[in-house]
Image (spheres, grey):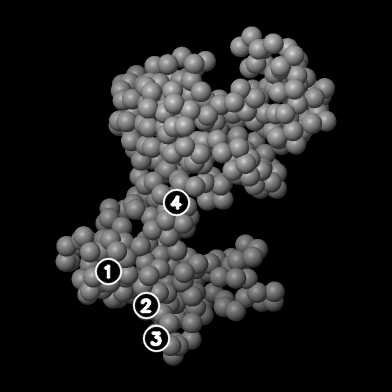
Amino acid sequence: MAQGDGRLQIERLSKNYGGVQVLDAVELTVDDGEFLTILGPSGSGKTTILRLIGGFTEPSGGRITFGGSDVTHMPIYRRPFNTVFQDYALFPHMTVAQNVAYGLVVRGVPKAEITPRVGEALAVVSLEGFMDRYPTQLSGGQRQRVALARALICQPRLILLDEPLAALDAELRRQMRAFLKSLQRQLRITFVFVTHDQEEAISMSDRICVINQGKIEQIGAPKEIYYRPATPFVATFFGDNNLLPGHLHHDRRDTANVDTPFGKIVVRDPRVVDLPANAAITIAVRPEALHIVAASGDAATHDNRFAGQVLSVEFVGATSQIRVAAPAAPDHPLLLKVPSLAGESAVRPGDQVTVAWRAQDCAVLPATLV
């Protein structure tokens, strides 16, 4: 395997269990040194992909290559990968140093070489003074870093992480997200990270692969998936998008008018160029893109607006969630997320308001809803 080429290539990878297809002809490329997150709900197939890459499960079809070499059926111990599991899988009867050294011991590395390498690995994860402790004497974050040190010590070219933050509390998860991303940049090792948590995926990833029911829905940079979801599933799973059904009427190259239950809406999305006139579509609008404005406000600032009634106002800390229904679509209220005020809310249930947003804040999706 050429050391300079660390690209992971997955070609039409499939997996069946007892006649049930859990992975359907998945195609995925992970570049050398990339932090890629596989994101999806429980049962979507994300962990199955990780297990197939790591060699813990045999595929039903397809091929996996790394650095140009076929590793589809290669034994686990021969793959230049290491895995960090959700439960960390530390040996409770071994010290931190013994846990970290385990991979080198089973490979027959001389003891004189093991000791300094253990020290180096623990220094990387900032646990130099913990060599003689046992896992029960460590916090959850410390146990996770021991598991990382054990994965790093064998000098893998790719690390697989199977929801390693799931067992941590919220504050520790935030700290470990920053630590993991910093570590990955420092070491320049390819990370493939599996999670169902959108915030984790956004904060750490170079790219995100969204998977659902064994198929990839979209692959892209976090901002691309957040602001330009490709399917209704991505729009609903990746945040709280408002989905509006409509029919498209072309105006100019990347701008179109759409007939919706809220009236005519202007959208600006390069994807409308490839759609036929009068196509049935779905518009996704993020709740933070919607604003309550004065009824006589400047029309040049916002391309779209409608009058409606406030149904509810929910304080959730830094933001408040407001639901507004239009008279023409009373059963389809829109969700707004606005900065919370220190005093009372600017609006209350029952108030009549005008909601507005820009054409470029609309993402055009296929018509079928999830």
Q: In this view, does 208 lie above or below 151?
A: below
In front of the other: label 4 or label 3?
4
Q: What residue type is labelled 2?
A: Asn
Mark-to-mark CA distance, 2 and 1 = 16 Å
Residue under the point 27% across and 69% down: 254
Q: Identify the mark nearer the N-term, 3 or 1.
A: 1
SS for dot 3: loop
In front of the other: label 2 or label 1?
1
Q: Identify the mark nearer the N-term, 4 or 3.
A: 4
Residue 118 % position (x, y): 72, 23
Q: Identify the mark nearer the N-term, 2 or 1.
A: 1
Q: Which amino acid does label 1 sit on?
A: Asp
Q: Identify the mark nearer the N-term, 1 or 4.
A: 4
List the residue tagged with mark 2: 304
Q: In which quarter of the image is residue 267?
A: bottom left
SS for dot 4: loop
Q: Which amino acid does label 4 sit on?
A: Ala
Q: Identify the mark nearer the N-term, 4 or 2.
A: 4
Residue under the point 36% across and 73% down: 359
